[in-house]
Image (cartoon, rainbow, N blue to C red):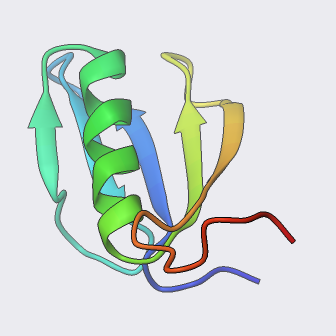
Amino acid sequence: MSKPQDRTISQRPDGTWENKRNDAGRASSVHKTQAEAQEAAREMLRNQGGGEMTTKGRDGQFRAKDTISPGNDPRGTKG
């Protein structure tokens, strides 16, 4: 099930890459490269308590899906 903070990285018609929340109408940020958009999405997800980041390729097909852990986890151990 998708959480509201989950994000998708995709290419826009002008060739730039957008970082967009799945429930948003507009992009949160726009970048020159896919890598820059992915890093911005990772940082935003860490700050929002984690979530899923889905990356689409140039052809619009899903390319990768990553789970981003919370950035402010008060517990230092796994489990």
Horizontal placement of 1 versus 33: left or right?
right
* Vertical side of 79 occupied by 56: above or below: above
Q: Of all residues shown, which one is farthest toward the front?
A: 76
Q: Is residue 26 visible?
A: yes
Q: Quadrant of the C terminus?
A: bottom right
Residue at 59 percent of width and 46 percent of height: 54
Dividing the picture into quarters, in which one does residue 11 lie?
top left
Q: Hey, which residue is sitting farthest right in the picture? A: 79
Residue drawn at x 23%, y 27% as measured from the top left: 13
Q: Quadrant of the N terminus?
A: bottom right
Can the viewer see residue 11? no
Of residues 28 and 10, the one drawn nearer to the viewer in this rendering: 28
Question: Can you give x and y, in whole percent of width and height, for residue 5 in the image?
Answer: 43, 77
Left or right? Give the position of 62 relative to 28: right
Viewed as shown, does residue 24 lie left or right of 53?
left
Percent coordinates x, y for residue 21 in the rendering: 36, 67
